[in-house]
Amino acid sequence: MKKKLYYPHCSYLFRCNFFVVGCIFFIFNNLYGQTDSLKTSSKKLSPNAVQSSVKYISQDSIIIHLLKKKILLFQDAKAYYEDIELTSDFMEFGFTDNELYASGVADSSGHIHGHPVFKQGDTEFRSQEMRYNFKSKKAKVTKVITVEGEGYIHGYNVKHVDDKTSYIKGGQYTTCNLEHPHFQIRFNKAKVIQDDKIVTGPAYFSFGDVPAPLAIPFSLFPLNKDRASGIVLPKFGEGTVRGFYFEDFGYYFGINDNFDLLLSGDISTRLNWAAKANSNYVFRYKCNGAINLTFSQNFKGERGTPEQETFNDFRIYWKHNQDPKSHPTTRFAAHINVITSGFNKYNPSSASDYLSNQFTSSLSVSTNAKGILFFEGAVYYTQNTHNKTINLSLPDINMNVRQFYPFRKKLKVGKLRWYDNISMQWSTQMANRIDTKDSLFFMQQTWNELQTGMQHRIPVTIPIKIGKAINWNTNATLVEKWYLQRDIRIFDPVIDTTKKEIVKYSSITKDIFQRGFSALHDLNLSTALTTKIFFQWNFKKGGFKAIRHVMSPDLSFNYSPNLSKNAYGFYTDTIQKKDIYYSYYERAIYRGVSQNTQAVARFTLNNNIEIKVKSKKDTITGTRKITLFDYIGISCGYDFAADSLQWQPLSISGRTSLFSFLDINFRFGFDPYIISSEGKRINKKELHVNKRPMRFSGSDLNFSVNWRFNQDFFTSKKKEGKRKTETQQSETIFNSMGMPSARPDFNNPWNVTLNYTFTYATSDNYNYYNVLYFGEKKYNSNIIQTVSISADVSITRKWKLGITSGYDIQNKDFTYTRFEIYRDLHCWEMKFECVPFGPRKEWRFQINVKASVLQDLKYKMENSFRDNY
């Protein structure tokens, strides 16, 4: 039962005498303000009167002492003056001194209720009692708690001199929101400037009201919400390889609302160092992006010894996004990510970067002319840090004309005829490319062998509808390729002059890069008949309601004549006494053209099978559709232009998904021709030699299991909630960049993702049929099995555990493994992460304040991966 509050000054007669109340309000209104400037402009105000009106209400009662010139308000009293709002259980207004006094009220048990709460603009604080002067707009507050930015200020005596500045005597600063905080920085005097800073005199730390031997001569806490410049304090520690070190020490420049810049660096006593520059930019309705430049020098081995190695690494990162509203037709985008092969190995990086070895960069510009002519220019850079290869396209240019119908009138009326649907298009691609190793990238020879090419394509499409179910599509594509270089191959064996014999047979030829213009032509004609055939069987009894089978036959013919007159050359192998033909354009950008005429007829039959069963969840139809096979395809072809081996292998492939977590893909190959005793396919059919239509030639079988478990898995919650949980559980509970500020989501008590992949591939082993190889297996086989897990679980409402790991069953080894532990300590947090084995073996422990304003108040221990070189 709620305790009744005791108000000694309540008057029942006051609330009933309307005449008295009217007189009182008339007097008070003349003292405290004007209700109508036109009517009262001629009246002389008291020199003690305030310039704005004061509005007030009270839940229980209002008492006015005319002789004492005071007004008393009780229980949930509220007063409004200009932009000030004050709430308290007791208030006292003084007419003569224009002063307001507010405090809580004690109940019968002595407990005080309704402490004053003061609001002005963005400032809000709660206190034990306060006095406020309406004329000077100054306030004196006792035992106040106010919020400034991410922190809380506790003050015993506070003088509020204006709406921006306050002075505190005897107080403390903390980021803990409790009335008795877990930790605080105590001080004797302080000045608070709203939205700017807090400056204190000598201060010391206190944890749980226990003073700590940590003191500072003064402290400054920034409260400015706008961008500001300042020093970035470093992370420091000690390691085996680096010795004592400082990381990320620098200066932040808050240039303006469009740009910022952070210059920082690392340094250690072992002279490992790094220099970093980071900048972000944003222009509303135009673009935004980020730039990151890093250069580092790391040492491995004992300095001054022959075992010492020096690693100079760098990273260039730039991402630029253009706002679609900035220009109606022109687009510019950039994503540059260029690093040295050892950067992620010897410098801190995310787990995803460390596990990746392929990095791609691009710059692109696209535009169009009235939606008819389209242009795109791009630069692509791809590097593989594992094999240290580089692929550069500088630039790639694409131009094309929108599809048009040459035989269709602009103002066509009535039904379209078959020739009205004939369409044409034109496109051109031009590229300059370099494929090399990173160590050879800046050498002149690499740039001398720059590949340049241009390709023109003119496709013509003739779609014809036969009846209502059959589509007949015919395509003719003319291709022309221009090159400014080609490779000339010569027979150049390496010969030992003393023994007069070949040293290495693998070095018997040499390619000579030759400059010069050449043009190649290619033509492709194709026609295809496609349709769909539907079968459905319905069942009246039982839970099995229907089977639906969709067949999609496709009969096609493709013809490509031999136009490779100038594309091939030959050299004479003097050892084997024969001519070897080769293409001048094997390494060219768009390759060469085929030297064989092709006339291939192909038949493909795709099948889709679904069933319909009873379902209580569907209240409309009462049934549920289940897909048994997404597709099962059968394909085979015949080449009329080939002089032998005209039948192509028969292929049966398919895909299905079962139980929403199991994906199955399969392919089986069958060859109609035999393999000779020399281990070669020859023009003899299996049907004639081995009395069977075909020979099993290989298969691919892939199982992929993906289980996702969470709190919604065993409940009937909405799918939207499930999708949200699945997105969250796909990531680790912390950000992967070291020890981040990102915190786990305790609303999801547990999330588990299990993945299992199984791949089994077989292919013909031609050596099995070769009489020179005895005891060989009939088929080459390869099995790949991997298991991976990503999980996080809330042990309690404050503890969170996470793990990311996997196991390669074939190699019998664990993949990248990571354990994480998080403890929510209210205003503090504790984090521990560990990579127990592998090249990235490391561990970190950190306990820190959550609020970013005190981000440097932390304790950290670690054993970095760089200490385990």
Image: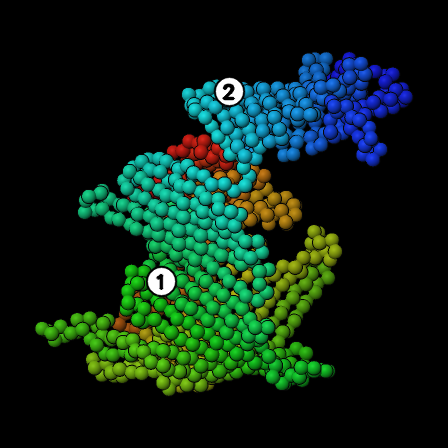
Quarter where residue 384 is shown? bottom left
Determine which of the numbered discs, if any, sits on residue 116 in the image: none
> From where the camera sits, is residue 269 visible?
yes
Identify the image quadrant of the C terminus: top left
Residue 255: where, in percent of width, then height? Answer: 48, 46
In terms of image quadrants, where is residue 285? bottom right
Horizontal relation, residue 630 to residue 111: left or right = left
Local crowd size for mark 2, using a 10 Å CA cut-off: few (<14), some (14–19), many (≥20):
some
Q: Which residue is mark 2?
A: 188
**Residue 778, can we see it?**
no
Mark closer to the chain start, 1 or 2: 2
Residue 717, image x and y in percent? 65, 45
Q: Position of residue 240 (x, y in %)?
A: 29, 37
* Quadrant in the picture for residue 465: bottom right
* Disc 1 to disc 2: CB gap under 8 Å: no
The span from disc 1 to disc 2 (Cα, nearest Å) is 64 Å
Q: What label sits on residue 390 in the rendered view?
A: 1
Q: Is residue 830 above or below residue 690?
A: above
Whether 637 is drawn above or below 37: the answer is below
Indicate the secondary structure of the residue bearing disc 2: strand
Q: Which sits in the foreground, 463 or 174?
A: 174
Q: Is residue 289 rendered to the left or right of residue 308?
A: right
- How many marks the image carries: the answer is 2
Amino acid marked by disc 1? Ile
Q: Amino acid at mark 2?
A: Asn
| Residue 520 percent across, percent down from the top left | 40, 82
- In the rendered structure, the answer to whether residue 277 lies left or right of residue 491 reads right
SS for callout 1: strand
